[in-house]
Image (cartoon, rainbow, N blue to C red):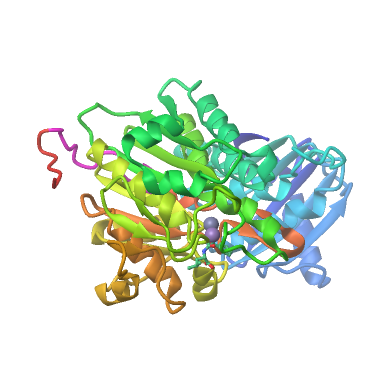
Amino acid sequence: MNLELQTLTWAQAASLQTDALIVLVSQKQDKTTGLLATMLAQAEKSGDFDSAAGQCMLWWKPPGLKTQRLVFAGTGQGRAQDVRQAVTLAVQSIKKSKSAKVSICLQDSHTPHLVVAAQAAADAAYVYTATKPSAKASLISKVTLGVPDAKLAEPAFAMACAQVAGVALAREWGNRPANHATPDLLAQAAKALSKHPKVSCEVLGLKEVLRLGMGSFAAVAQASAEPLRFIVLHYKGAAASQAPVVLVGKGITFDTGGISLKPGPGMDEMKFDMCGAASVLGTFEALAHLKPAINVVGLIPACENMPGGKALKPGDVVTSMSGQTIEILNTDAEGRLVLCDALTYAKRFKPSAVIDIATLTGACVIALGHLRSGLYATDETLASQLLAAGERSLDLCWRMPLDDEYAEGLKSNFADVANVADRAAGSVTAAKFLQRFAKDFPWAHLDIAGTAWKSGAAKGATGRPVPALLAYLVGQVGKPATTASSRRVKK
Ligand code: BES
Ligand code: MN
Ligand code: ZN
């Protein structure tokens, strides 16, 4: 989908030749004159439309206008989430029509609203076709964002284009079934990103992973016929002396649970267990478009979690790259086993921050549902910056606790740590496990089990938390440069 930015007043919109014109109307609407204002006043007077959030009215071939379709969409108080809802409803209402060119008339050139509107339009227009040829690809090919002052909106528009591309990539890979998104195919997708000038990619296989001592990651992969991949992405937008942010994405391309096998019903949804990895790919796609002056490293441990004769067994003890031994009490707690080695690997980049992103626990879905991702952090600045980035981008998270008492249950008689505790606070104990491997840098962990995809009729990947990650990273531009020599890493 193509995005375009344009200065567009209501008067100009009235003579716009397009397939569909979406006009956002808030309760704080200025009393403008002209044909659109007259139509709005009539629609309100007749009770057919009001500007409350969630209201939508479609006109077909409205007399006097050049557009084929006109949609008034109410944004109520005009909050970002109201703009999102209005654009979503409006685009859905014309999605099945023969509308290729869509223009959205926004009320201000305000940054977050423009990005939110663009994302909502792209999300509503998205159609999954990769393994469903019968699905008609979205007809909507061009969306024009009309604002009072296009010049003013240019930086926001650049952000919108980058985020939309990043979310699309994350959704696409999240949605692909496991046999169409193997660890090697993920690695190929990462390699494809290195066509962008500032992006490079390196892919490690089993030999290198074992040589590095990643015994925990390799153990998860050992029963699968699909070879594991450890993907390393670099985005170099600033001087090499600038410490990078490292993003680590859980890339379990299918999670059967292993010997601790999951129940059959709904197991298909475990193809989404690489949405953390997909969000890293999506964020790199967005960075490649936006080109901010920062450095970012992306790490993706990718493999399947399968049962079988070669599979890891409950009670097995593995040695992680950090040297810590781990007793596997439940082979279904595999995400933390692949992430811990990636976190140890992250240390070599002397990062300013490390953020891992993982569909880690069902317990997080119970705790926070599908609205907010679980955020854990050992660093207050990092925590508040991520929380704020989530609010700005409407990709919300919520801070969760890391009290040491929560780690009690991870004690083992046979290893340095067990991979599970009891059921209580399952999302927190998973984070406590990871924290043991993230002592050398400011660290945050996003448990996206509830937010990365939707179940039910709308089953599919959401592309979250690409918006929050991108907003956070863009917020790092111009932060005091750290030089390699001033960066101290605890050994
Ligand atoms: N990928 C799952 C987490 C998950 C479960 C996400 C359900 C979304 C919905 C993860 O690997 C897992 O299986 N976690 C276990 C941990 C348990 C064995 C301690 C879980 O949450 O049940
Ligand atoms: Mn699992
Ligand atoms: Zn999993």
Is 206 above or below relative to 267? above
Residue at 25% in and 37% down: 348
Find ligand 2 in the image and state its quadrant.
bottom right
Residue at 73% in and 59% down: 458
Is residue 329 on the magenta stretch?
no
Camera sees residue 107: no
* Residue 50 picture location, percent across and down: 73, 69
- Front in this rendered view, residue 195 or 395: 195
Question: Magenta span: helix, strand or loop, mainly?
Answer: loop
Q: Is residue 72 left or right of residue 294?
A: right
Residue at 48% in and 56% down: 334
Is 214 above or below relative to 58? above
Q: Quadrant of residue 417?
A: bottom left
Name the outermost residue toward the front.
Answer: 309
Residue at 77% in and 39% down: 131
Quarter of the figure that contains the C terminus: top left
Q: Is residue 252 left or right of residue 386?
A: right
* Residue 474 picture location, percent across and down: 37, 42
Q: Is residue 104 left or right of residue 224?
A: right
* Residue 331 picture location, percent across and down: 50, 60
The magenta stretch spans which residues?
470-484
* Residue 75 picture location, percent across and down: 63, 63
